[in-house]
Image (spheres, grey):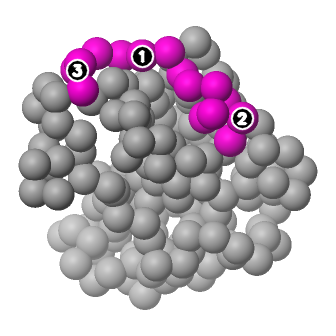
Amino acid sequence: TGGRRGWRRGRIPARAPVPARPYNVPMTHPHLAGFPVVVELDVAWGEMDSFRHVNNVVYFRYFEHARVAYLTRAGWFDLLDRTGLGPIVHSTSARFRKPVSYPDRLLVGARVIDVGPDRVTFEHRLVSTKGTDLAAEGTAVVVSFDYRSGKKAALPAEIRDGIDKLEQPGG
């Protein structure tokens, strides 16, 4: 599999890591109602900056953990292994509402809010269990990408179906 690593044209990237507890987190927080995928993450001491709160760049990594868990459940990484069609981030944004610091456990939700011909838009929310507040929210646009040709591609029907199943109540 050494030849599959990397992002250059014609090479399929290695499978993205999945967080330790990506699924079946009990959903009791009202800020995450309607989010089919929620991951639970612990804040690490090293994620804080000199202002004693988690550095803003780290929030994007938290969002990524939830998004990767969602994409895994939708079947996109299995499809990538079979066909070379996979996700690639087009753009991402965040709005920081409350600072988070160590120690804390976070609940990070991901859901799809728009599906286009070649892309999906995710909404993310991050909740502190220590403060029980909404700490951040954000979006990410993920484009369907053919890693073999190095070009964007139409969103596969298999992925649309996976998203539809996840976004159904009880998905």
Q: Is residue 158 magenta?
A: yes
Q: Which residues are magenta?
A: 148-162
User: Label 3 amino acid?
Assistant: Gly
Q: 83 or 60, which is in the foreground?
A: 83
Q: Residue at x 39, y 34 (%)?
A: 83
Q: 5 or 113, which is in the foreground?
A: 5
Q: 62 or 56, which is in the foreground?
A: 62
Q: Position of residue 91 (x, y in %)?
A: 38, 28
Q: Residue furthest bottom?
A: 103
Residue identified by numbered label 1: 153
User: Label 2 amino acid?
Assistant: Asp
The disc placed on residue 13 is none
Among the 4 quarters of the image, the one containing residue 17: bottom left
Q: Mark 2 falls on what kind of element?
A: helix
Q: 30 or 11, which is in the foreground?
A: 11
Q: CA distance from mark 3 to mark 1?
A: 9 Å
Q: Residue at x 34, y 70 (%)?
A: 53
Badge 3 vs badge 1, beta-carbon distance below 8 Å: no
Among the 4 quarters of the image, the one containing residue 122: top right
Does 63 sit left or right of 158 as displayed? left
Q: Position of residue 26 (x, y in %)?
A: 76, 77
Total of numbered circles in the picture?
3
Residue count near mark 2 (Cα–Cα under 10 Å), binned few <14, some 14–19, many ≥20: few
User: Label 1 amino acid?
Assistant: Ala
Residue identified by numbered label 2: 161
Residue identified by numbered label 3: 150
Can you say which quadrant of the picture contains the C terminus?
Answer: bottom right
Q: Position of residue 106 (x, y in %)?
A: 54, 73
Does 37 sit left or right of 89 as displayed? right
Q: Mark 3 falls on what kind of element?
A: loop
Residue count near mark 1 (Cα–Cα under 10 Å), binned few <14, some 14–19, many ≥20: some
